[in-house]
Amino acid sequence: MSKFDPYEHLNVSLNDDGSLTRHLNIPKLPATGEDQLLPGQTVVSKDVTLNAENKTWIRIFRPVKMPSSEKSAKLPMILFLHAGGWIDLSVANVFCHETCNKMAHEIPAVVIGLEFRLAPEHRLPAQYDDAVEAINWVKNQAKDSKGDQWLRDYADYSRFYLYGASCGANIAYNAALRILETKMEPLKIVGLIMNQPFIGGKKRTKSELKLATDQYFPLPVIDLLWELALPEGMNRDHRFCNPLQEADKEKLRSIGRCLVIGFGGDPLIDRQQEFVKMLVMSGVMVEAKFDDVGFHNIDMIDPRRAAAINEFIKEFV
């Protein structure tokens, strides 16, 4: 029997300088721009540079038509933080682009997809820094009379949500904790949506042991992703990985409403449920949507699950 290779499973190879070569060539889609509307097009999108030095940028999605019942009302804003195990994917990938498109159209909302830096070239907390920078960028648009026109015309700054899937959920949580001490007015973060949060810890949980050889997200792959993402020399009980280690209950109380989504076939399910318990015990209003059936990132493969998750988000927002 050949030895399991987590690099091969992830379709990446490690270079001598510590960087990765990513062999998966997932198709990317350009932003639509707003000039040429195709027949039946429901959402337009555009790209904006966030930090040229870090090569970070955002893609803003907005519905073509405002909902007729709310002519004068503005739309909630959602900062979208993609999955990819810290090491892969882009907000321009077909899957991420379409996810944002659907949210913008169906919720409806102004969706801001963040192209954050990837590990191991940029280890944590680089991704948290990028998310905080994106949130501050949005806040600054609100204060600037010459700020982004789409946000000015369509977005409600008092209804701002952070939405992350897998590692993106971890980024949403940590970015929210970081900005609690910052004056955010007129931007108001009213909720966190964490879809299958990628969290960990040194001590194995029952679900991790039971699903150690899971075909999508086996334990050696999870371990490798943390090894590539965490700061050098840090273990899986570091707070970036294990939010239960040093939870500041006082601080958490101000985090706002949370929606946590998980699936029974995800090796991380026990951790996600413990995480929900910790939030509730800290006085956070949590809505938990756990389904017995399903695996990690099922919504990337199963359109029905993706639609169900969108429905949860719509109700929550």
Image (spheres, rainbow, N blue to C red):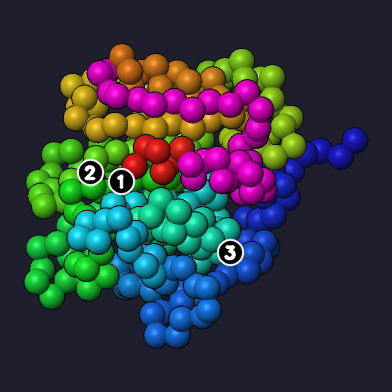
The residue depicted at 57 percent of the width and 17 percent of the height is: 205
Magenta stretch holds residue 310: yes
For the point 48% across and 61% down, the residue is 101
Q: Which mark is residue 161?
A: 1
Which contiguous range is marked in magenta? Answer: 282-311
Residue at 55% from the left image edge and 56% from the top image edge:
88
Q: Is mark 2 in CB contact (under 8 Å) with mark 1?
A: yes
Q: Residue furthest bottom?
A: 36
Q: How many labels, in total? A: 3
| Foreground pick, 84 / 220 | 84
**Distance from Cα at disc 3 to Cα at disc 1:** 23 Å
Q: Which mark is residue 94?
A: 3
Residue density around tag 3, few if under 14, some if 14–19, many if 20 or more, within 10 Å: some
Q: In which quarter of the image is residue 74?
A: bottom left
Assign the N terminus to one quadrant of the image.
top right
**Element carrying mark 2:** strand
* Front position in the image: 213 or 317: 317
At label 3, which amino acid type do we have?
A: Val
